[in-house]
Amino acid sequence: MIKKISFINIFISIFVFLMVFFVIMGKPVAAATHDDINLVINNEQVAADVMPIIQNDRTLVPARAVFETLGGNVEWDQSNYMVTVKYDNIVVILKINNKVATVNGEEKTLDVPAAIINGRTMIPARFVAEELGFLVGWVDSTRTVTITSPEKPEEPPVITGSVTEVLAEKGNSTKDNTKVTIQISEPLKSVGSYSTSMLTSPDRFVLDIKDFMVDSKVSDLIYDQKDSPLSAVRISAYNKNDVRIVCDLKEATNPVVDLSKDGKTLTISFRTLTTYFNPMEDGKLVVMLDPGHGESTAGKRSPDGSLREYEFNRAVADKMKNVLEAKGIEVLLTVNSDSDSSLSERCASANNSDADIFVSIHANAFGNGSEWTSPSGWEIYYFQGSVVGNQLAKDISSSNFPQIGIYNRGIKTTENLYVIKHTSIPSVLIEHGFYTNAQEVELLKSNEWRDKVASYNAEGIMKFFNSYKK
Ligand SMILES: [Zn+2]
């Protein structure tokens, strides 16, 4: 019985001891009732895997979860049990279980040291946050710690200069048809001080100058020239401290922007409106005819040697000249003899003349030139993207067909034919049939057929010109 009672007593004693032990041992953790403390950072509730706890009336918060959310940098040094929190040039260093912290190297004493709790580095919220410049609050009713970034005062705009003058004027060439000149008071440091963009519907070219303002004397302007893609320039303040210059355009075209050496003049150069063409502007209509090749050009003859291409080309050009001159058109030729001229010379003579259009006369070939081949037909080329060249090709083609009686290979466009690429006026190149085709070469040799194509070509050119006569 005694033994029995002793056994029960011992059992109860151990039980009570263990209860007390657990209560005592558990007390520091249990007293930090971390499950009911809320954390609000910059007005948003934050759920960290370890929530804040209160120790000796001081709140400890998980270093990384809190201060990285605030935009700081948190580093943990395992060998020194040290945590470093950086924000905005301020460095706070805390050691675990050490009441001395340093702030930018200066020692400060804490009420409660940093601690490791559940594997997380917990640091005193108010001390660290306030040293880093954050605002710390405590809402007792909801047991909430609030940490808030200070309101940064809005940076006043930094204006580095002003736009003092905006002009639009005529340029000197088709690539520089219209110049918009922007004068500014202070030099732009680099090409990065401005940016450009194209906007569509309607087409606009936009130039933004950073950290600039507009002088009150600068006003919007209308630009009214038939051959210019520009129609108006509008200048306004944009994005608080930028200047936006909007060029209203008649067509989408990418201008060239140039910043002067002194950084104080921006020039926007627009090329001539691609749809602009007014052959009547100087009161006369002038055609430059370009009979291809020459007597000395290698090859360029029928397999039987009965036709040289240059001879056909010249004959047709001469006939066209007669027909066109009879209709009051001025006709120029790129070559005036049987000899060949380089392609660049041919283009130069067109570009340096009053010619309104350029028509290159050729016949076609296929194969190695020593034997007859089957390809046949008529075709005409214009320079890719040329609206006016396309119209000229259409007018010449439609007057030739079906009257000239050969296969119509159609209207073609390319960027790779030298003479239509390097002439600055609307240009076409006509291939009148194949001298490597045994049937077609007979037409090419025939004076009647040459008369026919020459007059239909001339008729197409007149049709083209007539659409510009008012
Ligand atoms: Zn040719």
Image: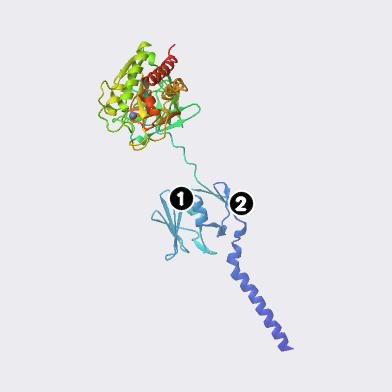
Q: Nearer the viewer, mark 2 or mark 1?
A: 1
Task: Please state, as top left, top right, bottom left or bottom right, where the C terminus lies in the image.
Answer: top left
Quadrant location of residue 93?
bottom left
Residue 29 higher or lower than 246, as above or below? below
Quadrant location of residue 8?
bottom right
Residues under labels 2 and 1: Cα distance?
24 Å
Ligand 1 shown in quarter: top left
Considering depth in this image, is 47 or 114 the residue closer to the camera? 47
Disc 2 CB within 8 Å of nearest ligand 1 atom: no
Considering depth in this image, is 206 or 78 the residue closer to the camera? 206
Q: Looking at the image, do the residues carrying marks 2 and 1 touch, with CB atoms under 8 Å apart? A: no
Secondary structure of residue under mark 1: loop
> Which numbered dot is residue 57?
none
Position of residue 179 measured from the top left corner of the image (x, y, whole percent): 36, 23
Position of residue 60 measured from the top left corner of the image (x, y, whole percent): 53, 58
Considering depth in this image, is 215 or 251 the residue closer to the camera? 251
**What's under tag 2, amino acid-wise?**
Asp
**What's under tag 1, amino acid-wise?**
Leu
Label total for image: 2
Disc 1 CB within 8 Å of nearest ligand 1 atom: no
Q: Confirm whether residue 182 shows in the render.
A: no
Secondary structure of residue under mark 2: loop
- Residue of label 2: 140
Horizontal arrangement in the rendering, residue 446 relative to residue 240 (left or right):
left
- Residue of label 1: 132
Residue 122 higher or lower than 456, as above or below? below
Q: Residues within 10 Å of mark 1 (few under 14, many from 20)?
A: many
Position of residue 54 measured from the top left corner of the image (x, y, whole percent): 57, 58
Q: Residues within 10 Å of mark 2 (few under 14, many from 20)?
A: few
